[in-house]
Amino acid sequence: MEKEIELVKMSSSEIIEKVAVYKDEEIIVLNQQNELNNITHNSIIKTDFALAILCLKGSTSLLVNNNPYDMYSNDLLICPPQTLLKIETFNKDLTCYGFCLSSEYAKRIFLASSSCSSWNSHLYIEEHPIIHLNEKESLLFCQYYNLLHSKLTGPTHRHQKELINALLQAFFYEFQDSIENYIHINIMSAQSSFKSSNYLFNAFIELLVSSYPKVRSVNYYASRLFVTPKYLSSICKDISGDTASVLITSYVMKDIVCLLKSSEKSIKEIANELNFENLSFFGKYVKRNLGISPKKYREGLTISQNKEMKFRKC
């Protein structure tokens, strides 16, 4: 068993190096050319990233978490982190577009563009990793891939990070309708539905997203949903990989960062608006989750803005 795990880790690293045309700590853009001849038959990839690959030409057979699948032209493979992948067979003319996002980066992008329905998509994709796109959707994917590739490999942009974030969020929104339509068709044909636990999770996310200021207590949301806090956290962990508390903190921090960036209110006023007991507790909460105090975070923004103004004058 230890030998097999070692093979997985080694293969993942080697394969990514061979097929990556761009790579940093958060995103990897995979080469569109057929590089599978560099991958051995026994190679297993244990992903520590979120993966999206579109088959443009040819076909391949693969195992996803030990389940067999076939990919053909216009098939989109979507895998969350910690997925086991193994190439079984492939055509010599196989050509793909694709990219990977680190686990933490994918989570930030996903939460920024998430909705109740997008969580349904996330759940469905875990059980059905390959989705067939029509010609228009396939072309759209290629357009996003080409734009992402050009922005990452071209001249450095002053707002490159924000631009890439916005581009990936736009990609999520663009494909949300396509994925939901695919899910609807397949669910209706199978006359099946998600478990009640998924509906509970969706209700929690909807309640969390729609509330302002957000209550930071798991007990509050559990009581609104008529379940115990322990059960709610268990459901969240099973479905999203994070506890209810972690998800609450993610959304609260999103509000805090937004106010610190764009609001003219003082830090004390922001703390009051978000229902923190006092300024000291607010400061500790922000430092625990951002790594710096709200004051230093704002000072950093001011320095950045001053540099930008100086740049514009030049």
Image: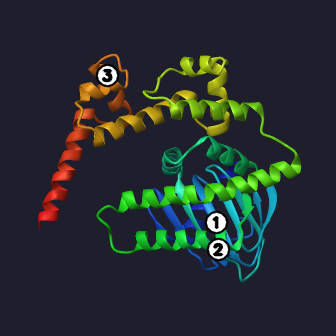
Reading the image, the residue beneath label 2 is 96
Determine which quarter of the picture holds residue 56.
bottom right
Query: Mark on residue 53?
Result: 1
Between disc 1 and disc 3, the foreground one is 3
Reading the image, the residue beneath label 3 is 272
Image quadrant occupied by the C terminus: bottom left
Sequence order check, earlier mark of 2 and 3: 2
Q: Are marks 1 and 2 in contact (CB under 8 Å)?
A: yes
| Residue drawn 68% across the image and 56% down it | 179
Q: CA distance from mark 1 to mark 3?
A: 46 Å
- Amino acid at dot 2: Cys
Q: Is residue 119 above or below residue 265?
A: below
| Residue drawn 58% across the image and 60% down it | 174
> In the image, is 164 to the left or to the right of 218?
left
Sequence order check, earlier mark of 1 and 2: 1
| Residue drawn 67% across the image and 34% down it | 238
Asked which secondary structure carries label 2, the reply is strand
- Amino acid at dot 1: Ile
Q: CA distance from mark 1 to mark 2?
A: 7 Å
How crowded pointer 1 is (Cα within 10 Å; few <14, some 14-19, many 20+) is rated as many
Q: Are marks 2 and 3 in contact (CB under 8 Å)?
A: no
